[in-house]
Image (cartoon, helix red, strand yellow):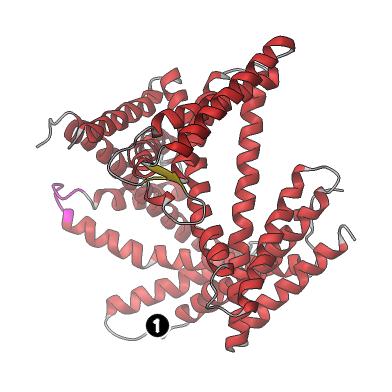
């Protein structure tokens, strides 16, 4: 590793320690790391968006003479809508920024409506309506739990009817299933964060200090 | 007109994106692809607005000497460094006068920030210094051929400084910040996991089984692994399905309200 590589490792180690120092208390090193992070990530995403979106989706399209004239003109509409977005900076013409916003809201609402309806609602319902009493006992029990758990979970989220009687019982079973999910998600989150922490410690004691071989 | 046209646009584009789903014709897909591209193109301008906002907030903190104002200089320096790196690239083996150029550009920005606050003769001094550093950076940029500025060729992303800042600054901070949550989540777990009732006990047991399955040295590790897999594949799947179906139906209802103009909160006031 050359000088700049070593310098990078030392810098990364300093920043890692700076962030970890927050565990003691909020301090100037943590605040500096935080400020560096905000600035650099804003600049990073701006540049990535510029090259990935404005350059590839607009510039390369409008300057590509292999495309038809329509295909070269249409990206200009997106560009003009984008420029209209900047009108928000000027009070008198700020209302113009609603046009690109309306376009994005409308297009993404329609897009997500179909995507979520197909993948979240329809596909999940279809996967739940399955033959229960099929295969060995373990499969039967698993299938039963999946069907009953999904149904009871949905009952719990149905707030238009009071949760009493049989409906209330199903709702209670539903929340038991939900608690298992929350517990499992919590366990997974803890383990993933632990894994990240181990990664950082491995970097500090291995890559930086060379204590782990 | 200020509100009617945006509502019409929401309806037209919302209806079109739903409609095109049922029309798998190439012309419909052609228009759909362009709509997706427009969203991405508009996105960069929205991001530019966000950066403008970051600039204004930072300048305001510096000028009014608000608490921790000094860190705003660090934020702005990081922002402009990445932007400079993103639009420049080395042409040969040497960087030449690239780093003096970067420093000169940063000094121009610092002088401009000082100009906003300063009054009288000091304002003229800062403007003069800003102009001086600007001329220096232009001269370096013009005469130094070891690197070049790029806006219309994707050389910018090949700048090693850009990648190094990402690898040695952004990634370590980001992953350490996320890893810190391990400590805070532990204290949260203490409060949440006290087995006060049946529901809390179910949560505790499920979380413990999932966490312990990664510990191969524990007695009965195999049992924990199998139970954890069953928990994830059966009850967890069932409850997740209920949540996902609920989210799906919620998104459909909200999208319909937006497209039909019932939900208008995104339009703001005025």
Instruction: Look at the image and give the residue range highlighted in magenta.
Output: B215-221
Magenta stretch encompasses residue A16: no
From the viewer's side, name the closer residue of A185 and B169.
Answer: B169
Given the current orientation, which residue lies at the most extreme left position? A213
Given the current orientation, which residue lies at the most extreme right position? B1
Q: Secondary structure at mark 1?
A: loop
Residue drawn at x 77%, y 56% is A98
From the viewer's side, name the closer residue of A201 and A76.
Answer: A76
Q: Position of residue A84 (x, y in %)?
A: 74, 55
Magenta stretch encompasses residue B220: yes
Q: Position of residue A66 (x, y in %)?
A: 52, 78
Specify the quadrant of the image occupied by residue A199: top left
Q: Position of residue B75 (x, y in %)?
A: 52, 30
- Identify whether A23 is placed above or below A173: above
Q: Is residue A100 visible?
A: yes
Q: Is residue A49 left or right of residue A133?
A: right
Q: Tell me if mark 1 has few (under 14), some (14-19) or many (20+) residues whose alpha carbon lies within 10 angstroms of its own.
A: some
- Identify whether A116 is placed above or below B99: below
Residue drawn at x 28%, y 75% is A138
Q: Is residue B72 visible?
A: no
Check the picture and name the quadrant holding the N terminus of chain A. Answer: top left
Chain letter of the residue beneath label 1 in the structure image? A
Label 1 sits on residue: A132
Specify the quadrant of the image occupied by residue B12: bottom right
Q: Main secondary structure of the magenta part?
A: loop
């Amino acid at each position: 590793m050359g000088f700049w590589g070593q310098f990078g490792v030392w810098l990364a180690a300093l920043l890692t320690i700076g962030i970890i120092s927050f565990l003691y208390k909020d301090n100037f090193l943590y605040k500096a790391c935080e400020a560096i992070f905000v600035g650099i990530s804003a600049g990073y995403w701006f540049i990535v968006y510029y090259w990935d979106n404005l350059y590839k989706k607009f510039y390369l399209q409008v300057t590509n003479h292999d495309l038809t004239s329509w295909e070269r003109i249409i990206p200009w509409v997106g560009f003009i809508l984008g420029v209209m977005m900047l009108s928000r900076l000027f009070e008198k013409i700020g209302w113009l920024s609603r046009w690109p916003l309306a376009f994005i809201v409308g297009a993404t609402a329609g897009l997500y409506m179909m995507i979520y309806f197909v993948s979240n609602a329809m596909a999940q319902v279809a996967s739940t309506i399955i033959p229960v009493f099929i295969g060995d006992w373990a499969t039967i029990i698993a299938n039963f739990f999946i069907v009953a758990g999904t149904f009871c979970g949905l009952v719990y989220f149905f707030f238009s009817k009071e949760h009493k009687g049989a409906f209330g019982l199903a709702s209670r079973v539903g929340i038991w299933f939900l608690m298992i999910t929350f517990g499992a998600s919590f366990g997974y989150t803890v383990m993933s964060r632990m894994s990240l922490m181990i990664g950082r410690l491995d970097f500090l004691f291995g890559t930086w200090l060379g204590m782990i071989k | 007109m200020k509100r009617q046209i945006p509502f019409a646009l929401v309806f037209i584009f919302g209806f079109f994106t739903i409609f095109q789903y049922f029309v798998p014709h190439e012309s419909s897909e052609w228009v759909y692809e362009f709509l997706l591209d427009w969203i991405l193109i508009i996105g960069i301008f929205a991001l530019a607005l966000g950066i403008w906002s970051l600039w204004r907030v930072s300048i305001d903190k510096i000028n009014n000497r608000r608490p921790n104002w000094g860190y705003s200089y660090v934020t702005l320096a990081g922002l402009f460094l990445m932007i400079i790196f993103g639009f420049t690239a080395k042409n040969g083996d040497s960087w030449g006068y690239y780093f003096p150029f970067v420093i000169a550009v940063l000094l121009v920005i610092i002088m401009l920030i000082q100009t906003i606050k300063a009054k009288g003769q000091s304002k003229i001094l800062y403007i003069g210094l800003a102009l001086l550093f600007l001329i220096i950076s232009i001269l370096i940029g013009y005469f130094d051929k070891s690197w070049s500025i790029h806006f219309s060729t994707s050389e910018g992303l090949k700048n090693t400084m850009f990648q190094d800042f990402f690898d040695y600054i952004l990634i370590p901070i980001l992953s350490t910040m996320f890893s810190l949550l391990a400590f805070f989540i532990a204290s949260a777990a203490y409060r949440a996991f006290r087995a006060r009732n049946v529901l809390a006990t179910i949560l505790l047991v499920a979380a413990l089984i999932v966490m312990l399955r990664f510990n191969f040295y524990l007695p009965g590790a195999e049992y924990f692994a199998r139970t954890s897999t069953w928990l994830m594949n059966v009850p967890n799947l069932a409850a997740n399905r209920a949540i996902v179906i609920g989210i799906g139906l919620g998104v459909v209802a909200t999208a319909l309200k937006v497209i039909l103009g019932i939900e208008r909160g995104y339009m703001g006031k005025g």
